Image: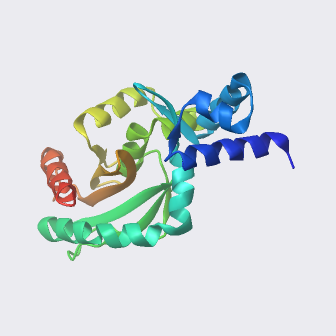
Amino acid sequence: MIQSIERAVAILEIIAQEGGAAHLRHIAEKTGLGKTTVHNILKTLDELGYVSRRIGDMRYHLGNRILNLARIAGDDSALRTRLRPVLERIAEKTGETVYLGVPSGDEIYYLAGIESGQMLKTSRPPAERERLEGSAVGLVFLAFMPGLRKRVLATRADAFPPDIVAEFEKVATVGYALDLEASSPGLHCVAVPWRENGEVRAGIALSGPSIRMPRKTLPDLAWLMMNELDKMK
């Protein structure tokens, strides 16, 4: 076996056994490795998105990337079923296309969608994949998932405008993201995050023609979507 991989897997298993978060000292004691060795492995896992640190918390948590692997392995169907009623209510109240997306690696994977019944509409087929940059759902994930943002910016910084960090900060502050004809001419989209145990697990987006969804109405639509999600709590 490759020793470095064996050690990294052992560290991830210890964090999982501790409920998803563990201190460096505890990990070192459990593995029998020196703190410096464990710290270096955790640093690499952090950069790859498999562990993460939180403000005010000295523990290492399982990161979004490994949680996404767990989701892909068996949680997609449950997540789709759980959030389907929310999609239906939003679609009924707005008359526009609504869809559910989750992070998958460094992409968006769309689990479900409900198309508008109107002739002029947008469409997002289930199982479609999309790059994070340029979409409202992608902005949500990049704004609220620091590990993912760090990894994507490190590898695809040229795909983003120079002021993208300010945009992430704005999305994190207001709680929703907008796509104003960035993906397709004449189409607007607003997306909000869905959290589970404090972690962003998915994004719900509402999309339609800009003539029916003008810029000034999008904050109210975002508020409506967030209210529907709050009803699940």
**As rendered, which of 36 and 176 lies closer to the eye?**
36
| Residue at image point 71% right, 22% down | 36
Q: How many marks?
A: 0
**As rendered, which of 44 and 16 lies closer to the eye?**
16
Is residue 120 something that shows in the picture?
A: no
Residue 194 placement, left or right of 49: left
Is residue 157 something that shows in the picture?
A: yes
| Residue at image point 12% right, 49% down | 220
Residue 142 placement, left or right of 159: left
Residue 221 placement, left or right of 111: left
Residue at the outermost top position: 36
Residue 118 in percent (x, y) is at 20, 74
| Residue at image point 67% right, 31% down | 28
| Residue at image point 41% right, 45% down | 141
Q: In the picture shown, does residue 229 fall above or below 96?
A: above
Residue 152 in percent (x, y) is at 55, 39
Where is residue 72, by image quadrant? bottom right
Residue 27 in percent (x, y) is at 63, 35
Residue 82 in percent (x, y) is at 32, 69
Where is residue 87, by image quadrant? bottom left
Q: Quadrant of the C terminus?
A: bottom left
Q: How is the image coloured?
A: rainbow
Residue at the outermost right position: 1
